[in-house]
Amino acid sequence: MRFAISLFTVLAIASIIGTVLKQNEPYADYIIQFGQYWFTVFAWLGLYDVYRTPWFVIILAFLVLSTSTCIYRNMPSMLREIRSYREQATEQSLRHFHHYAEFATHGNPLNLLMRYLDAQGYRYKQVHNNDTVLLAAKRGSANRLGYLFTHSAIVLICIGGLLDSNLPLKIEQAFGIKRLETRDIPESQVPAVSRLSPDNLSFRGNVTIPEGTSADVVFLNIADGYMVQDLPFRIALNKFHIEHYSTGQPKAFASDIVILDKTTGLPLLAHTITVNHPLTYDGIAIYQASFGDGGTHLNMDGWNLFAHSGTPFPVTGAVHDKTELAAGNTRYTIEFTDFRPFNIENLGGNDTPQHDTRAVLGGNAVADKKNLHNVGPSFQYKIRDPEGQAHEYSNYMLPILIDGRWYLLSGMRDAPNEAFRYIRFPLDPERTLAGFMRLRGAMLDPALFPEIAQRFTRSVLHGSDVDAQAKLADSTVKVLEMFSKGGYKTLSNFIETKIPAAQRDEAAQTYLKILELSAFEAYGIAQQQAHLPPPKQDDETGWFIRDSLNTINDIFFYGAPVYLQLATYDEVQASGLQLTRSPGEFIVFGGSGLLVLGVFTMFFVRERRLWLLIKPNQVLFAMSSNRKTLDFENEFLLRKQHLAEILKEN
Amino acid sequence: MLLTQTMPRPALIRQLDVFDWLFAALLWGGAIYAFNLYGAHMDSYEKGFLFGFAAIFSALGWAWKPIRLLLLTVAIFSLLGIADYHGNLARAQSSFFLKYFLASQTAIMWMSVLFVLATLTYWIGFAARSEFAEKVGSALTWSALTMGIIGLLVRWYESYLISPDVGHIPISNLYEVFILFSIITALLYLYYENRYANRQMGAFVLPVISAAVGFLLWYTFDRQAQNIQPLVPALQSYWMKIHVPANFIGYGSFSLAAMVGVAYLLADKGILASRLPKLEVLDDVMYKSIAVGFGFFTVATILGALWAAEAWGGYWSWDPKETWALIVWLNYAAWLHIRLVKGLRGPLLAWWAVVGLFVTIFAFLGVNMFLSGLHSYGTL
């Protein structure tokens, strides 16, 4: 018993660890979280899949076994107890009962007492012995069935659970009959040693099917690898739908699937599955589990950030696919990772490419309250340089209005666990990106600096002496050069190293002013070169110039040779299905039913026994119960009172 | 003569008076009327629910008489509230009765105020040994309960007024289940109060309801959680309608047991012992409450497994919520074992019941706040 309790405690602690430590995450995440040393220790203990580690399963199996023995040992005596009236009780033993009373009587109260017991729902046996009669009565014997029911139920539930666990697979793995696949290879190339046959007794796996395609396997993610489970049929996804409430929250996730015959390819059944409404086919339940992008085709305008031209070049790609990009001698790889047709959440987007349709988070009373509106499509990609270093980007397709001005937003981050930092590309007064790109081109082109400086000086110092003009033009070129090398940072470095502390603030103000006004001139030149009308001298242009300078500065930290602006797309969705075969389910549910029955019998059927030993002129009365409760005490007092009255009247 | 009183077994059905029959007739009449009106739109589960509830509440009303008046009052005022809407949600602001009494927000505010008042009154009665104050406390608790149920029922109707596809039973998020928790705990308490003819426990049980109300008010005023939200796909299931209430009968019972456990511990140390009921009575209430809670928690967990088999692809997937439900279950199973099999009594069990409440609170709230899983329906 003590041993069993210790084992239970171990299981409870293990279970708690399992809830605190996120289970079945990619191993790389754990290494980041714990470091190499603790990662190895935890992996050895099996804490990443604690409910399926051998020691957990063995303890569970042991508890089942010990409960079974317990039932086996106690059942015969329990059944005897249920049937028995304990009519062997002697006068001597009755007198020793804690709940005992005696009454004086005359005449024979036997019939009256029997009627009383009948009326109170007691069943009883009579034992005649010389001149005494013993009435041995009982009620609520079913209480003991409660014990049998609950304990058998627990055994049943565990057996059912064990049937549905991956125990056989674990054993096969231990003997090397099956092996995990850890390579990222096409499913068709996975060798037989990592494949499970369609006859597999129980499994639970996932598969993501893009619209218009089909699959006849599911993947079982185990530890740091996976296994391929072959299905006895093929599933084709025609269409994945999301319906929304008028408030924007998701209302339904549904997949139109067709079950196909694996050999002939003929359709067997067409069905729409939704969350909470799975389809069971051939003993396999098919659930709507998640959704994601199935390879949306993207057509983009690429804005070269190295060669500063005012015209984009076309780029095409598809989600989950990659494309090459040459910039000078360097070759970059662009990996498209995700596309979203709408973003209803707040700006700053969340970053799980797979969306769990089964989560109940949206039921949150305070969720989705702040500034809900659709800001349009977005897509995500990584740009990897030849050294393999990658930055990740998330770009919105449509411009977004912030503080009354329009911007295109592009998020950047260095690692998947960081949040995106957004850079804003300002739109010019014609609402295009070209204006900014032209301005940037001019601001980064040293050949233009003298001309910019001249125009600027002329505009601010008309009519003053030539020396002053030349001096200002000189400083302007310097300022422009510094800004073109590294943005505000270079400027501030210069100020900090070259200018005495007392004058720094003033100098900074002056330089910014120079920069801003000469940027306006640069914009004018850029417009002229593009054969466009000169910029207006209004607030809008002013803000555009200021925003542009900030963005030019930010691009120094953007880390990409190109900004991709989404022009058009052709969406392809994918549905994540979970398929399970769990033959233990009905055993578990049967066990559960038995458990409920047992629990209620145990607590709400009270067993009590009652003896009446009728002697000439005296009745001895005793009561007992297997559980001492207040109700029992009260009942004893009540019975005693009743009996006293009955025997008096007799 | 006395024999005729003691001899026949007191069968419930023979003790029923005319009001009991009238009550049952009203319930069944109502069910049949509703069936005639809406039967065409109901699926078989809903039909089962409708008549199942008529049967359950008839029996409940017979077994515990105050239920009859409660249900009748709730029915009359909820229907009045619903009728007063004339199918127009905006009337919540314009109609006098809705704005000040029956609109769900108002009713729930009334419930909150009445529960807090009841707590104070119970304490006054407890401190001053005033039976009158304690009776007032009971009356306030009954009123709070009534307003709470009316609030939930009217809210249910209001959700359909927002849009037919938004409409759903109001037990779908943390805000709504806190109301449910307050109601169920109050109802359980009132049952024991009635059964043991003892009002002193109110001073201990009502604070836990007041705490829930406090949370509810913070959630309303600080987080605006009171707005009706549509159901996410995962919650669109008839299982929710039984899984959640069964769970909250469990949670309510466990909280009640813990609070009675606190009273027990105080009385055991001789603190306030003269004002509290006898230790045996406290012990008995604690035991019964845990037994009832355990029964319903078992049912709720199994219903959860049945639902999970339909929504999550497996009856048990060691989701943090599931695991913690199992831990709570094992905790109380151990409590009951120690008491029933080993026959243990006394302060240890009371301490355990109090600690059990913290385990339960973690399973109810902590899991949502600190752990990640599919069952995180209510972050703060």
Image (cartoon, grey):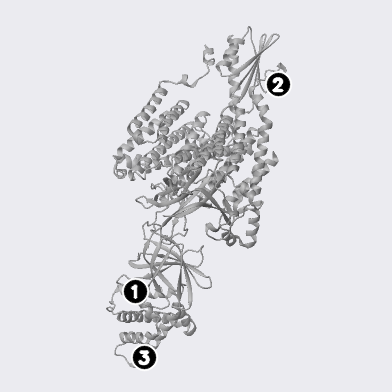
* Residue A588 figure quarter: top right
Q: Amino acid at mark 3?
A: Ala
Counting residues from the start of the chain, the first of labels 3 and 2 encountered is: 2
Parent chain of label 2: A
Question: Which residue shows up at 66% across the image and 29% down it?
Answer: A75
Q: How many marks?
A: 3
Q: Are marks 3 and 2 in contact (CB under 8 Å)?
A: no
* Mark 3 neighbour class, 10 Å CA radius: few under 14, some 14 to 19, many 20 or more: some
Q: Is residue B192 visible?
A: yes
Frontmost of labels 3 and 1 is 1
Parent chain of label 1: A
Q: Which residue is mark 1?
A: A434
* Mark 1 neighbour class, 10 Å CA radius: few under 14, some 14 to 19, many 20 or more: some
Say yes or no: labels 3 and 2 on the same chain.
yes
Q: Which residue is mark 3?
A: A470
* Mark 2 neighbour class, 10 Å CA radius: few under 14, some 14 to 19, many 20 or more: few
Q: Residue B296: horizontal and vertical position, in percent?
A: 52, 36
* Residue B108 figure quarter: top left
Work out whether A524 lies above or below A137.
Answer: below
Q: Residue A78: horizontal and vertical position, in percent?
A: 65, 27
Q: Amino acid at mark 2?
A: His
Work out whether B356 lies above or below A413.
Answer: above
Marker disc for residue A389: none
Counting residues from the start of the chain, the first of labels 2 and 1 encountered is: 2
Q: Regarding mark 2 in the picture, which secondary structure is present there?
A: loop
Left or right? Give the position of A194 relative to A93: left
